[in-house]
Amino acid sequence: MLIERPPPARLDPTVKALGFVTLLNDLSSEVAVRTLPLFLANVLGVKAGVIGFIEGLAESTATLLKVVSGVLADRVGTKKTLVLWGYGLSGFTKPLLFFAASWPLVLVVRVLDRIGRRWTRPEPAWVSSARLGFSTSAGPVRLPSRATTTRPSSSSL
């Protein structure tokens, strides 16, 4: 007996665009984060304690903004605005590292970059609200949540 499979689902262009932008943003952030301590230590002559302070302040800012970005996304209502502002801020601040002649400017750029990346956290909700194109002849496919899935009992195995 042959099982007919539906044609492969097509992704919404919004999902594709967000995936590409996220890839580029994450790639540029990872390159900057990995090379920044070397730049600070070897070019600017900054001590390890100051490098730790810069990274610690940037990461703690990002952690604190997790809550704020979620609440802000709920209040604003349009997640697209927050995601665009977040990617814009992150993309605008990274090139400023080129002009860094002292560690305080690096600190400001790192904190602003982390703020921008945290503002993109409503992105998963925006993607899930986009029309993903998954449908059947009976209508859209509803995937079960984790809470409703069951595992087979050991006696049935």
Image (cartoon, rainbow, N blue to C red):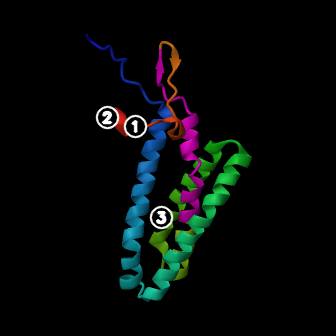
Q: Give the number of the mark in front: 3 or 2.
A: 2
- The part of the image, by quadrant, that contains residue 8 is top left
Mark 3 and mark 2 residues within 8 Å of each other at the beta carbon: no
Task: Give the image location of residue 154, x and y in percent.
Answer: 36, 39
Q: Is 49 one of the magenta-colored residues? A: no
Q: Is residue 130 magenta?
A: yes
- Of residues 69 and 102, the one nearer the viewer is 69
Q: Residues within 10 Å of mark 3 (few under 14, many from 20)?
A: few
Which residue is denoted by mark 3 in the rendering? 95
Q: Amino acid at mark 3?
A: Pro
Residue 128: x %, y % from top left: 54, 37
Q: Residue furthest top?
A: 1
Tag nearer the camera, 1 or 3: 1
Q: Earlier in the sequence, mark 1 or mark 3?
A: 3
Q: Which mark is residue 30?
A: none
x 58%, y 35%: residue = 129
- Left or right, 23 with respect to 56, comes to left
Residue under circle 1? 153
Q: Which residue is mark 2?
A: 157
Residue displayed at 46% across by 49% down: 22
Tell me how far mark 3 sits from mark 2, CA to CA: 57 Å
Marks 1 and 2, Cα distance to the nearest angstrom? 7 Å
Residue located 36% across and 78% down the image: 38
Q: Secondary structure at mark 3?
A: helix
| Screen quadrant of the C terminus | top left
Kindly identify the amino acid type of the residue bearing the numbered disc 2: Leu
Q: What is the secondary structure assignment of the residue under circle 1?
A: loop
**Percent x, y of residue 94:** 48, 64
Mark 1 vs 2: CB contact within 8 A: yes
Image: magenta residue range: 113-136
Q: Where in the figure is residue 72, as x and y percent of width and height?
A: 70, 52
